[in-house]
Image: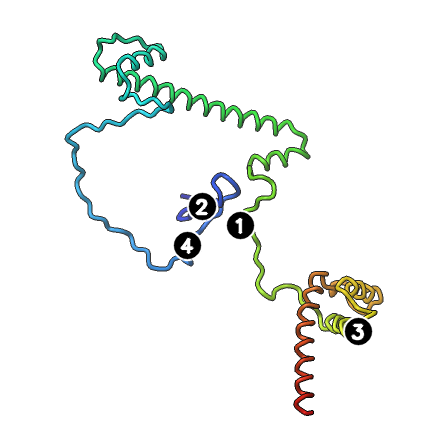
């Protein structure tokens, strides 16, 4: 109904993060085949001949049906229920099952009330914090994962080749620094020294500041160009040998 009619909402981890809404147009892209409304065969429900008996749950390790009558009576007395030992075993078992189920229900309700009370007190505590601490405390409640964890869905991907490219002018400067290092080993350039030289070019007005690549980009450029340079040198040597 309303804004999210025909939509599916989901979270990456239950109760953590924000809702992601999948609209019908998004679901159509994921659809591999035509979705047809099922038309199941309907049959009449059967009527059981015997009543279904479902055991009442309890969080104890007591196996009631394996207890002797004396032990059942002891358990009943422990729970404040006194029964005549002459009562048949079936009635004793039923009474003990009800007592254990009631005890289990009371524990569950008490646990839920304690949880609600803890959440309420934590919320009140956050409201009383200074503004500069409130946002951090609130985020810890909404995102209970330990610091350092991240959802894979939050990972950002970039298309190959969409990063900032090195301009032709800067590329020529880098090439010059690299070849100069090969000619004179005493003036060998590293990625750091190349970056320093480019920054000096910016100060001298030769290139723009936004043309200067990052240190990591220069390091990658050196690796690629060194491989290319070795290949070109090998081809030149091969041609010279062919002519000799």
State the residue at coordinates (36%, 12%).
78
Residue 183: percent from the left, percent from the top? 80, 76
First-in-chain label (4 vs 1): 4
Quadrant location of the C terminus in the rendered image: bottom right
First-in-chain label (2 vs 3): 2
Is disc 3 placed on a helix, strand or loop? helix
Q: Where 94 sits versus 146, above or below?
A: above
First-in-chain label (4 vs 3): 4
First-in-chain label (4 vs 2): 2
Cα–Cα span, label 4 and label 2: 12 Å
Residue at label 2? 9
Residue at label 3? 180
State the residue at coordinates (45%, 21%).
110
Residue 102: percent from the left, percent from the top? 35, 19
Cα–Cα span, label 4 and label 1: 21 Å
Comparing 240 with 143, the one in front is 240
* In the image, farthest residue toward the right: 204
Answer whether labels 2 and 1 touch (C-beta < 8 Å): no
Mark nearest the camera among 2 and 3 is 3
Is disc 1 placed on a helix, strand or loop? helix
Left or right for 182, reference 48: right
Quadrant location of the N terminus in the rendered image: top left
Residue at label 1? 152
Answer whether labels 4 and 1 touch (C-beta < 8 Å): no
State the residue at coordinates (46%, 24%).
111
* Residue 127 picture quarter: top right
Disc 4 residue crowd, few under 14, some 14–19, many 20+, Cα 10 Å: few
State the residue at coordinates (71%, 70%).
167
Residue at label 4? 27
Is disc 4 placed on a helix, strand or loop? helix
Q: Which mark is residue 70?
A: none
């Amino acid at each position: 109904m309303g804004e999210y009619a025909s939509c599916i909402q989901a979270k990456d981890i239950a109760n953590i993060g924000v809702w992601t809404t999948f609209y019908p147009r998004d679901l159509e892209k994921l659809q591999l085949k035509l979705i047809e409304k099922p038309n199941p065969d309907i049959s009449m429900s059967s009527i059981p001949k015997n009543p279904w008996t479902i055991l009442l749950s309890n969080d104890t390790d007591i196996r009631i049906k394996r207890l002797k009558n004396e032990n059942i009576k002891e358990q009943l007395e422990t729970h404040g229920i006194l029964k005549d030992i002459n009562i048949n075993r079936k009635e004793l078992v039923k009474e003990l099952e009800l007592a254990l189920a009631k005890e289990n229900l009371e524990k569950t309700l008490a646990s839920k009330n304690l949880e609600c009370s803890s959440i309420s007190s934590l919320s009140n505590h956050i409201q009383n914090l200074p503004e500069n601490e409130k946002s951090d405390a609130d985020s810890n409640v909404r995102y209970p994962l330990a610091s350092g964890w991240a959802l894979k869905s939050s990972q950002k991907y970039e298309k190959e080749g969409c990063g900032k490219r090195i301009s032709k002018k800067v590329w020529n400067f880098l090439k010059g620094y690299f070849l100069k290092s090969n000619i004179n080993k005493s003036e060998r350039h590293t990625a750091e020294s190349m970056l320093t030289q480019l920054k000096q070019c910016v100060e001298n007005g030769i290139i723009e500041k936004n043309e200067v690549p990052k240190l990591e980009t220069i390091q990658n450029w050196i690796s690629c160009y060194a491989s290319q340079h070795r290949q070109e040198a090998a081809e030149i040597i091969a041609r010279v040998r062919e002519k000799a």
